[in-house]
Image (cartoon, coloured by chain):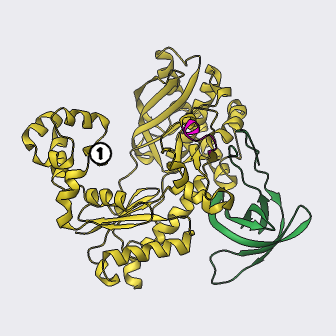
Amino acid sequence: MLIMHIDMDSYFASVEQQADPRLRGKPIVVSGRPDIYSVVAAASREAKKFGIRAGMTTWEAKKLCPRLVFVPGNPDRYLSLSRRFFDLLTRYTPMIEVYSIDEVFMEISQEAPRYGGPVEMAKKVQAEFRDALGERVTCSIGIAQNKMLAKLAVEEAKPAGVRYLLPAEVPALLEKTPVEAVCGIGPRISRRLSSFGVLKLADLGRYPERPLRREFGVYGGTLSLWGRGLDPAPLIPYWQVEEVKSVGHSHALPKALRHPEGARNVLLYLCEGVGQRLRAKGLAARVIHFAVRDKEMHLRGGQRALETPTDSEETIFQTALDLCRERGGFPEESTLVAVRASDVLPKAETVRPLFSSDAKREHLAQAVDRIRDRYGDRSIWRGSVFASCRALAPATGGMGQQREIPPPKREPYASVTSR
Amino acid sequence: MSRGGKVEQRLGIPVEVVAQFSPRARYPRPVSLKWNGREREVDAIHLVHEAREGTARLVIFSVTAGGAVLELCYNSEGARWTADDGHRWSEG
């Protein structure tokens, strides 16, 4: 099996530099507002030279590079471009796994020979991306026998290169690669492994599997495979994606909304979003999760199972509010609020509302959904959150409205039949 | 354009645009526009992306026209064009 991993280079930042020539050659980051607790979503190549990385807080980034330019995110732009490159890739093969908005895996064992080999195929993909997306929006490509190795190979291809990892090169790569370089081995697992003297992937491969299983359970078996350059994870093509398991929203709060009333309004705003998305998917949720973060960055929250599954924002909001009250209410200064609805099932399998008041609320929610579908998400507001939401809109930079990455709409085998 | 961490609301000012529509092209191609009372040629189209506003399909062109960097938005409902000058949180 041959897997190609395509990873867009500094995706959001490159797209912004492509859209606005004034940003080219400058250290930029795509982030939330720099004056609130927000994080860097993507850093340009120029910003990375200063040590700025995605996930860093905006104030840390500003300290590393005082002339850093902060650019708000534009999810529509990234989704639109992602759709375009997913569409391009479906011409090569239907065996594409959409890993994230800027990363895909492709199974190319049968396709590569048609293009003169995997490296030539990768270069053709890069050339097509340049034509379709612009010179600035580049991708790196790693090719190997499985997804784990292809993901390691792509790191050696950055930026804008191609790395084909031959089977004979795998042992040397495992010898030099630290365990935490594998997606799935976080800092905690890595610390536990280092206490056994396991620092590199090859150390992991040499370590007996049984004690790994004793320490990490089933996951120990996967760790052992990774250490030997094997990956049990199959490629899951986009047309076989798993069903939605939960729907959630969170929001970092701007200074003006960190008081309890502001946090409560933002929670209601987020619950509306969760309810709307559940209804759009025809789902209802059994479990509601709530979390709030205070100014010391301590996160607290909980979850509750409902007797009747719901897609109603009122029920989601009241449940979240109860969970909040049971934990002492909103802190004097909240910096983030989050709500999630999980354990979902099709709405059609739930009981219809018994009382007319519930049925009325359901009809009202559906009417609001129809207005938003027709005129846009921001066309109708709840009075109690209107003032807060006007403040929230610029605070999110659009990133708070991130949606799922839609898979390509093409039929799975359309590309094969059209060749 | 904003400075110092504040951001100006996008205005979406209606503009007159001369555009080429071609049956083979995915999008119309803006050629020139009237901006601040002046007619400007579109010098370069840097990026095109799509968005939705309710049922309306928007095609947004990031362009340079007469030396200014603008976002031109074509709303397929009513074939309306609007422009704004983009925004960022702070200047470098």
- Identify the residue under disc 1: A184
Depth check, front residue: A357 or A60? A60
Of all chains in the rendering, the one displayed in green is B
x and y percentages locating residue A341 in the rendered image: 45, 37
Q: Secondary structure at mark 1?
A: loop
Can you say whether A201 is above or below A125 in the image?
above
Quadrant where the N terminus of chain A lies?
bottom left
Left or right: where A403 falls relative to A147: right
The image position of residue B19, as x and y in percent, is 77, 76
In which quadrant will I find the C terminus of chain A?
bottom left
Q: Relative to A212, is A231 above or below?
A: below
Type of amino acid under label 1: Gly
Query: In this view of the protein, can residue A111 be seen by the observer?
Result: no
Q: Considering only vertical position in the picture, is A266 above or below B91?
A: above
- Residue situated in front as seen by the camera: B48 or A172: A172
Magenta residue span: A61-68
Colour of chain A, in one word, is: yellow
Residue A152 in view here: yes
User: Quadrant location of residue A64?
Assistant: top right
The residue located at (62%, 37%) in the rendering is: A34
Residue B35 is left or right of residue A346, and the answer is right
